[in-house]
Image (tube, helix red, strand yellow):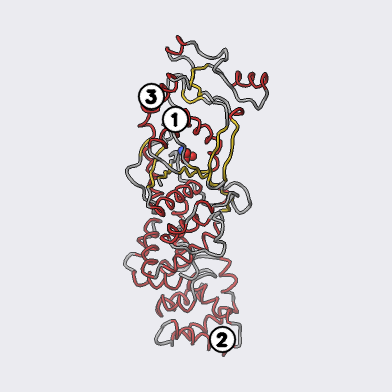
Amino acid sequence: MRVRFAPSPTGLLHVGGARAALYNWLMARGSGGEFLLRIEDTDRERSTPENIEQILDALRWLGLDWDGEPVLQTTHEERHRAVVQTLLDEDKAYRSTATAEDVKAFKAEHGADRGFRGGDHPTRVSAEDAARGVGAVRLRVPEGETVVRDLVRGDTTFKNVHLDDPVVARADGSPLYNLAVAIDDLDAGITHVVRGEDHLSNTPKQLLVLQAMGAEAPLYAHLPLLHGPDGKKLSKRHGAASVQELRDAGYLPDAVVNYLALLGWGDVDDETEIPRDELVKRFDIARVSKNPARFDEQKLRWLNGRYLRAQGLDALVAAVQGHLIEAGHGHMVAGKEDLLRTAVEISQEKITTVDEFWPLAGFLFTGPADDLQAREKWLDEPHREHLAAVRETLAGVDPFDTEHVDAALRALVGERGVKAKDVFQPLRVALAGRAISPGVFESAAALGREETLRRVDLALEG
Ligand code: GLU
């Protein structure tokens, strides 16, 4: 098996593209085959080195390694031109000046579902003019049918009579997209073309090129579109829609790979966490549903949380630290490795991406946040009175660890005969400056007695 991912490097790698890349990769790795990368850079303005690097970078981050060097489609242009010439020489293609208007007029005359045939049409260029490079090159569509053999959708049969003779090269001989793709897949020995459903209408044209070349067609798998949770085509409105955004939001590549692999994959509804090596073993393109798949970032978030915790504390600390450095908070935690470890440990149940760590636990490093609403609610007169009692209690807790803080404060709640939250929330707001934080006993223990009392004093004064 030999497959390829063939992105047009026009910017970020969309999650739909990432899914296509992943499915190709899983097929190759699961079969001992090869996964090639072809950069379709024919739009030269948009195919900048930066855009190409963005795609490679996103693939590397996902851990989708490719075989051999990435190839640039434009480097094959001579070959494409040579094929066009051969097709012309063999009269499988012809030059024509037919415009969209001419095609329309042809249909008006022959019936709307009759494909344009330009071989005997007045717009067919004379041999002399053809030799001078007049007219675009159109492929002759033969009689019969064109069958797309698709592992996801089954066979789709196109009756050739409905297909227009496709333009395969411009008047200057430069190849058009469908010709280039067909030749490149053939030359690379691609056995399975796995790509988005948006390419389905291109496939008969590519098959016709291969047929004209006397070549065998690969098998196809057209992946259904991705929708957002609202059933509409996935876009930025739904949140992170590219691999780069997912990375910046603090997702782990393994979780993203796991989630994308399961998207629209028929029979694994009850399963969520499947490690990469097992995905490689079990992935089966034939099980991909042909219905649109729903990309739900909430589910990904949930799955990511599981991956975060499953990797163990050391790895999680390293991931958080790496993310903080990237986000420009590195200096805030520098030299505070022990506190960082503790902070991650007490936050891990509450975060689903590494990006959520700092908003939750940053106060341990930088001081309380300034959430006015939380202060008004939990540091009003009656709560301050409880907080003063908390201060007194905490001053005597020894050793000052989670367990002892916990026991002392619970005893205080009992003594005062109040609701636990009326004692714990004021302390939380004193320490964190907001009503959400890791466990309040854990947070106090992480800060230590001195800093805890200092923050409580500030809250009592304020
Ligand atoms: N270059 C095309 C794209 O980025 C993919 C072509 C293909 O996979 O055949 O949409």
Q: Residue 82 carries which label?
A: 3
Q: Which mark is residue 214?
A: 1
User: Which residue reaches farthest top?
Assistant: 128
Q: Give the quadrant of residue 254.
A: bottom left
Residue at the (47%, 28%) spot, across then down: 212
Residue at the (54%, 79%) spot, across then down: 424
**Residue 179 placement (x, y as % from top left):** 46, 30
Asked whether 7 or 150 is in front, the reply is 150
Answer left or right for 271 relative to 331.
right
Q: Which of marks 1 and 2 is in front?
A: 1
Q: Are marks 3 and 2 in contact (CB under 8 Å)?
A: no
Q: Which of marks 1 and 3 is in front?
A: 1
Q: At numbered mark 1, what does the secondary structure look like: helix, strand or loop?
A: loop
Q: Is residue 374 above or below residue 194?
A: below
Structural distance between the alpha carbons of marks 1 and 2: 85 Å
Q: Nearer the viewer, mark 3 or mark 2?
A: 3
